[in-house]
């Protein structure tokens, strides 16, 4: 059940344009470089499926979701389900991840939220992982500029 109490949030300012950040968020080649080696498959259209494949803590995984909304260079929202969670593949067990981009002084503020976390421990774990991922994204983009 979605609660306001267990929303994971991470944000970072990246010295790159919203366009460059957007490209990194939707380009499988770049995603693999900052998202823990994950392979992502999607056509990046609203309503389309999204699949994440890789290995996490020694276990192979294949997560799935759907692109719920996207506004290029501004916002991306998708659902996410991981079989490794041990939960049933039901809509109420999917996270909703929203990534907002805001241009500020020739930089981009990236704000990420993940709702539908089961409890505070799950929220904290997700927040830690998202912060690491955003730091890797920042490093990747700023090293290229």
Image: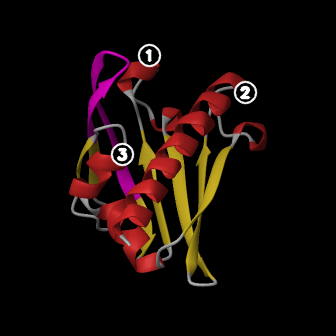
Front residue (pair 38, 114): 38
Q: As drawn, is 120 to the left or to the right of 42? A: right
Of callouts 2 and 1, the N-terminal one: 1
The residue identified by callout 2 is 120
Please tell me which residue is depicted at 37% across the width and 44% down the height of the picture: 35
Mark 3 burial class by Cα count in 10 Å: few <14, some 14-19, many 20+: many
Position in image of residue 97 (x %, y %) = 52, 51
Position in image of residue 119 (x %, y %) = 69, 26
The residue identified by callout 3 is 65
Of the 4 image quadrants, the one containing the N terminus is top right
Residue segment shown in magenta = 52-67
Please tell me which residue is depicted at 35% across the width and 37% down the height of the picture: 36
Query: In the image as oriented, which residue stretches furthest toward the bottom?
Result: 105
Q: As drawn, is 124 to the left or to the right of 137? A: right
The residue identified by callout 1 is 86
Q: Is 33 rendered above or below residue 129?
A: below
Front residue (pair 20, 9): 20
Of the 4 image quadrants, the one containing the C terminus is bottom left
Position in image of residue 95 (x %, y %) = 52, 41
Please tell me which residue is depicted at 32% across the width and 40% down the height of the picture: 64
Mark 2 burial class by Cα count in 10 Å: few <14, some 14-19, many 20+: few
Determine the CA span between mark 2 and mark 1. 17 Å
Query: Within the image, what quadrant is residue 100 found in?
Result: bottom right
Q: As drawn, is 50 to the left or to the right of 87? A: left
Tag 1 secondary structure: loop
The numbered mark at residue 12 is none
Evaluate whether residue 22 shows in this view.
Answer: yes
* Camera-nearest label, 2 or 1: 2
Determine the CA span between mark 1 and mark 3. 16 Å
Please tell me which residue is depicted at 26% across the width and 62% down the height of the picture: 27
């Amino acid at each position: 059940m979605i609660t306001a109490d267990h929303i994971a949030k991470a944000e970072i300012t990246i010295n790159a344009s919203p366009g460059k950040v957007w490209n990194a968020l939707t380009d499988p080649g770049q995603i693999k470089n900052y998202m823990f080696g994950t392979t992502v498959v999607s056509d990046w259209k609203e309503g389309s499926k999204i699949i994440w494949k890789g290995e996490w803590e020694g276990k192979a995984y294949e997560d799935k979701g759907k692109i719920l909304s996207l506004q290029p260079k501004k916002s991306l929202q998708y659902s996410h389900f991981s079989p490794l969670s041990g939960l049933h593949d039901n809509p109420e067990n999917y996270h909703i991840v929203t990534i907002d981009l805001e241009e500020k002084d020739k930089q981009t503020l990236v704000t990420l939220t993940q709702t539908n976390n089961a409890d505070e421990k799950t929220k904290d774990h997700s927040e830690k992982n998202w912060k690491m991922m955003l730091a890797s994204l920042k490093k990747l983009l700023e090293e290229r500029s």
